[in-house]
Image: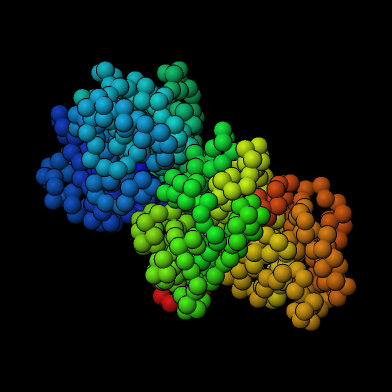
Amino acid sequence: MCGIVGYIGKANAASVLIGGLKRLEYRGYDSAGLALLDGDNVRVSKAAGKVANLSERARTDWTPELFQNAATGIAHTRWATHGPPTEVNAHPHLDETGGIALVHNGIIENYRALRSRLETKGHHFLSETDTEVLAHLIGDCNKGDLFQAVCDALHQVEGTFGIAVISAKEPGKIITARRGSPIVIGVGNSEAIIASDASAILAHTQRVIYLDDNDIAIVTADAVDIRDLNNVPVTREIAELGLDSAAAEKGGFEHFMLKEIHEQPESLANAIRGRLDLQLGSSVLAGMGTSQRELADLSRVVMVGCGTSLHAAMVGEYAFEDLADIHAEVQQAAEFRYRNPILGNRDFVIAISQSGETADTLAAVREAKQKGAFVMSLVNVVGSTIARETGRGVYLHAGPEISVASTKAFTSQVSVLLMMALKLGRGRRFSRDEGLKLAREIESIPELVRRVIEKNDTIAEIAARYVDNEHAFFIGRGPMFPVALEGALKLKEISYIHAEGYHAAELKHGPIALLQKGTPVIAVACEGPAKDKTLGNIEECRARGARILGIVTEGDHDAEEVMDDFIAIPRAHPLVATIPATVALQLFSYHVAHLRGCEIDQPRNLAKSVTVE
Ligand code: AGP
């Protein structure tokens, strides 16, 4: 997620802005920039890499007087979504005249159409970003009133934004607005600081105003005038942050993992937004760079990944076979490259990775390319090595995932795999109506997850009953089998409980020997073709004294009756239900680990990205 800082006050704007960007560094980024008002000019300095690079660059680009005396400016740390992480793509971006500067967090979905229209009017673009298009659009709408120009431009925008805008022709003010990306305004003594995250404001004031969607504000050193996009005044109360800086980085949550679990309705909305075609009943995954004709020629899907990404691939295997009528298989990335895989040009290899830097997955990509397969990636970090070496694929748009335990990346990976399977299935098998039905199921995923997160307190109470166990079994069938594996991985990596995931039918082929009175078995038994068989396996476990925690479908009282405890999730298509079921297990694992006093965000022995074999 990008970071935004704006400052208007007495002087020293450059130092305040750079200090604010440093407070936002934890969110992850790949480049940074800032712009200052300097008389009739807007001065911009940008740098790829760390904020320290920008600070050094700005001191080289600008005079000490400007650095010390400028009183108004905006700044940005970029987490690339459109265009690689380069200096030219870094924000701020300028309009055609160079007199208006903009920083932006979010995704402008219709930026290509807007750019074409502006190019026919003579606009020239330097970057590949959607943000630069918005800067030019504001300039194009500017008839001498910056506030009105921003309103007029935003009325033409489809997508999400959190922005801050300055103009050399209208010094002494910053225009800021939001839709879908947070903006908070710190109100100080003859100064104001705007940010995408309260952690950038804490050093200056605890008094803040949170903008709501479609709010737009004129911010000066002494006043904040908030309107809606139709220029109707709105009232927003000044709140007291009551946060210290460490807490603010986590958005008030105790751990990044809990913050990222709670971000999932938003991160999933970002993964799905603009990618479902509700006219054709299909999906629109431009990054795949393939025609329906090319997809129709494919004979097999091979997915490679590690850890949580491997589990997402396993859900994808069911999705491609059930929905797209194509043979699908999953390979652990390290195994894939050493087994001399049999691959050809009709094999569709998908490398799945949050970081895009996992050594084994990268090596699998290179091996698949050697074998002439059709290769693409499904990654979260834009411009990462795997993304670049596959050259095509789909970005998760989940925002930076800080906690070592992967949560929002997994649910976005599964969502994108479902959309890929819908796209293949629509071309090979589905009618429009069948495709539309599934597309609407996928569209409902953020709401399904929100309803599970609402049960956080209930899940915490249940977790308290499982804190003292040193062993646990997770079981499931069908697409809920990889969900069981993922739940076991979450619990073991943050609570250090020895948790194992098994196919529900597999227990009686040996592992059931380990069951004793009270041994916890977490059973994913949601509505679906395999539910009754799973209930039978649960009875086998109960007969040996196990304590059963069930993940069940809301209203399924038959299933509830065979459980000692249960977490009920909303009814959904069996493949879609894998996502809310996983979120329930994420919260369960988090609360068990928290009650055990574990470190959680940085578990022992683990790294966020395993860049070695
Ligand atoms: C998941 O919680 C772990 N952090 C780990 O298994 C991770 O999924 C694995 O290392 C793969 O990472 P990647 O998705 O960045 O490739």
Quadrant in which residue 145 is drawn: top left
Q: Nearer the viewer, residue 239 or 231?
A: 231
Quadrant that contains the C terminus: bottom left
Using the image as rendered, state which of residue 475 and residue 461 is in the foreground. 475
Q: Nearer the viewer, residue 245 or 584?
A: 584
Tell me: 141 left or right of 334.
left
> x, y percentage for residue 1?
42, 48
Quarter residue 43 falls in: top left
Residue plotted at (23% across, 56% down): 53
Q: Exactly how many numbered labels are in the figure?
A: 0
Which quadrant would residue 176 be assigned to in this image? Answer: top left
The image shows residue 117 at horizontal and vertical percentages of 31, 27
Residue 220: image x %, image y %? 31, 28
In this rendering, is residue 592 above or below 23? below
146 is higher (above) or lower (below) than 256: above
**Residue shown at 18% from the left, 48% from the top:** 58
Instruction: Give the residue displayed 48% in from the left and 69% down from the top.
Output: 343
In the rendered view, does 362 fall on the left or right side of 56? right
Residue 184 horizontal/vertical position (percent):
43, 38
**Residue 189, above or below 554:** above
Lateral position of residue 106 relative to residue 524, left or right:
left
Q: What colour scheme was applied to this rendering of the protein?
A: rainbow
Q: Is residue 165 visible to the viewer in this orientation of the structure?
A: no
The residue at 30%/43% (across/down) is: 128
Whether residue 320 is visible to the viewer of this picture, yes or no, is: yes
